[in-house]
Image: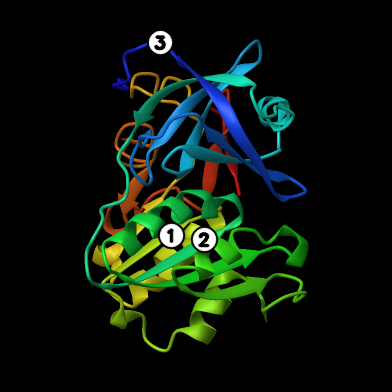
């Protein structure tokens, strides 16, 4: 079956549900072919509730965190329940081959990085993964990453791994970031901002790729709800993955907009 963004949602059946931690689940669908490439997202229709953008965590699965009404409803679905999917949308990660790569993820930002890591491994890359979490209880995907990469973990409260944020982990576990041919990152805005500034100081922005999160409504680049200042880049269509050189001077990590488009400081 071909998947085109102009089509109406296609029905999929949930084949398996995996609990990652208390607030995070992965939903595997009854599709054997890839629903998109690493970094792309699907518009997921939870019938009677909402349609929301979610990145792929495997070629045929999504991983969600329970944070609002739509994700809470999705969180309660089980095997053999159904959803509507549109997509894939957006530009994903650029994949390199036979190189040394670093993946940096915080919170639910690990989801698209797991799919990415699987594809990078298939392309014979040497992978290192840095995982940032609030505490030990919220850590997830660490065992999956260990199957294909060297893994380092930090927690903000020091309950596991290095105490601190993921930038502290980066500075403590990597002697020289220049040894990597490409660096991929996804996580909260403040994490992305700290990494952007650090990589800018190291003069390696041109070999960094970031997956950015914004409120996405149309997914087609029409409504502008996901645009980021000052270039007006549309996360839904121009992203969600951007090179660091494209967003170093952006609003990311400084302010965001709510559903009404009103700006607020982070």
Crowding around mark 2 (Cα neighbors within 10 Å: few <14, some 14 to 19, many 20+) is many
Q: Which residue is mark 3?
A: 8
Q: Earlier in the sequence, mark 2 or mark 3?
A: 3
Task: Report the Cα–Cα distance between label 2 and label 3.
Answer: 32 Å
* Visual colour scheme: rainbow
Task: Report the Cα–Cα distance between label 2 and label 1.
Answer: 6 Å
Q: Are marks 1 and 3 in contact (CB under 8 Å)?
A: no
Q: Nearer the viewer, residue 4 or 17?
A: 17
Please provide percent x and percent y for residue 43: 47, 25
Q: Secondary structure at mark 3?
A: loop
Q: Earlier in the sequence, mark 2 or mark 1?
A: 2
Q: Are marks 2 and 1 in contact (CB under 8 Å)?
A: yes
Q: Earlier in the sequence, mark 1 or mark 3?
A: 3
Q: Secondary structure at mark 1?
A: strand
Residue drawn at point x = 67 percent, y = 31 percent: 71
Q: Which residue is mark 2?
A: 105
Count the marks. Answer: 3
Q: Which residue is mark 1?
A: 185
Please provide percent x and percent y for residue 87: 37, 25
Please provide percent x and percent y for residue 164: 66, 75
- On the question of residue 194 being in view, the answer is yes
Q: Nearer the viewer, residue 165 or 99?
A: 99
């Amino acid at each position: 079956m071909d998947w085109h963004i102009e089509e109406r949602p296609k029905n999929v059946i949930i084949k398996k549900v995996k609990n990652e931690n208390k607030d995070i689940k992965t939903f595997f669908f009854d599709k054997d072919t890839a629903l998109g490439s690493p970094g792309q997202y699907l518009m997921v229709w939870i019938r009677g509730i909402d349609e929301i953008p979610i990145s792929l965590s495997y070629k045929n699965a999504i991983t969600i965190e329970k944070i609002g009404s739509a994700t809470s409803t999705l969180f309660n679905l089980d095997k053999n329940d159904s959803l509507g999917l549109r997509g894939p949308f957006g530009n994903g990660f650029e994949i390199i081959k036979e190189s040394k790569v670093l993946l940096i993820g915080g919170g639910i930002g690990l989801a698209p990085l797991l799919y990415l890591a699987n594809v990078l491994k298939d392309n014979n890359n040497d992978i290192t993964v840095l995982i940032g979490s609030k505490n030990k209880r919220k850590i997830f995907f660490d065992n999956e990453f260990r199957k294909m990469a060297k893994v380092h973990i930090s927690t903000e409260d020091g309950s596991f791994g290095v105490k601190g944020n993921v930038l502290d982990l980066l500075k403590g576990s990597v002697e020289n970031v220049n040894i990597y041919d490409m660096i991929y990152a996804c996580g909260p805005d403040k994490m992305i901002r700290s990494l952007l500034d650090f990589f800018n100081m190291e003069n390696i922005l041109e070999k960094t790729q970031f997956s950015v999160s914004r409120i996405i409504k149309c997914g087609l680049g029409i409504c502008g709800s996901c645009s980021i200042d000052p270039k007006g880049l549309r996360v839904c269509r121009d992203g969600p993955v951007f090179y660091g050189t494209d967003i170093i001077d952006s609003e990311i990590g400084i302010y965001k907009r709510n559903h009404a488009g009103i700006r607020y400081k982070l």
